[in-house]
Image (cartoon, rainbow, N blue to C red):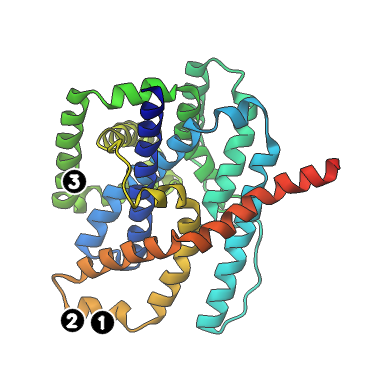
Amino acid sequence: MEQKKGAGRIAKWDNARWILITLVVICHFFENYLGNPVANSLFFYVYTFHMPAFFLIAGLFSKKTVEDRRIDKVAPYILIYIFIKIVNWIVQMIIYGKYTSINWFVESGVAWFALAMFFMYIITFYTKRFKPVYGFVLSVVIAMILGYTVENTDIFCWLRIVNFYPFFYLGYVISIEDITKWLENKKIKVMAIISLITYFVICYVGIDKIFWLRFLLTGRSGYYRLEYGMAYGPLIRLGVYVISFFIVFMFLSIMPKRRFILSKIGQRSLSVYVFHYVFIYIYMASSLYKYLPYKYPNKWWLFIVAIGIVVTFICGTKWPDALCKWIMNSNIKYRKNAKQ
């Protein structure tokens, strides 16, 4: 019985990763159409919870690595960061025919996630000494204060790391068993369905009034980008945190514990993240980018969703995953060889 429970619990998180990474890919396609009401609504809705949920799940499964201070498990994220930058640089050079140098210390694209994972682990090596409540409150307060910055936040992606760290830290300090038990409560599931539908309606109907908050959802911008940012920035950031945490838990609550064929993509979410933007560059350079909205003004977004799902499936196949696993395990092999 205990084995079945464990298997179900693992499947739940794999399913969450599978859905989340699919939403990441779809939204990255939609980013190129921002300004369109449908794109704006989907972007805002998904960005409220998709990266926060990823970091919270990463925190949940970080406990052994953090407790043992396994730097050899963390360092490969730097290799992933470098790999993403090189791959995207090569693809852009081939497609657009322009040579530009790589800035290893500044990142405004998708590689930021790998860098963030590295630094969040390193930070937690030290914050694990704090009482959980103090550590969590401190991480939120620091994010609220540093939102006043007007500096370049793409240097080491530092503001994104600060803004998303509370999700990682909370995942680290809470028990997987406790959160799973809470999420499986039937009343919570009913509330989750109602809440997610209600929030989607709000994002769709009222997007013109709330879209200015998107700068806080990406974690990349300071308060100066907001309409009332400099005066009420910290309170707005706190409000966004409350909404994001709530929607994250509601989303996780409706994730099934049953394993599906596509649940394996959840185990391979890193490879999807690493390679999916290659397809976006290709799509942007193709005629489909402008053709779909022109030919199908009311249904174009359905094609984008379908393309995003297909790209997720392709990037979640065996070979991309094998390459990413080889990179993530390379440092471990190096340490073993070094000891010999």
Q: What residue sits 20% from the left and 33% below the top? A: 192
Q: Is residue 107 visible?
A: no
- Three-letter amino acid code of the residue under disc 3: Phe
Of 38 and 184, which appears nearest the observer?
184
Q: Are marks 2 and 1 in contact (CB under 8 Å)?
A: yes
Does residue 219 appear anywhere in the picture? yes
Q: Amino acid at mark 2?
A: Lys
Pointers 3 and 2 in contact (C-beta within 8 Å) = no
Distance, label 3 to label 1, CA atoms, is 28 Å
Q: Which residue is mark 3?
A: 200
Q: How many marks?
A: 3
- SS under mark 2: helix
Closest to the observer, 244 or 216 = 244
Q: Which residue is mark 2?
A: 295
Q: Of callouts 3 and 2, which one flags the residue occurring earlier in the amino acid sequence?
A: 3
Instruction: Tell me what residue is drawn at x 54 percent, y 52 percent.
Output: 112
Q: Residues within 10 Å of mark 2 (few under 14, many from 20)?
A: few
Residue 155: image x %, image y %?
Answer: 60, 52
Give yes or no for contact between labels 3 and 1 (Cβ–Cβ under 8 Å). Answer: no
Q: Residues within 10 Å of mark 1 (few under 14, many from 20)?
A: few
The residue beneath circle 1 is 291
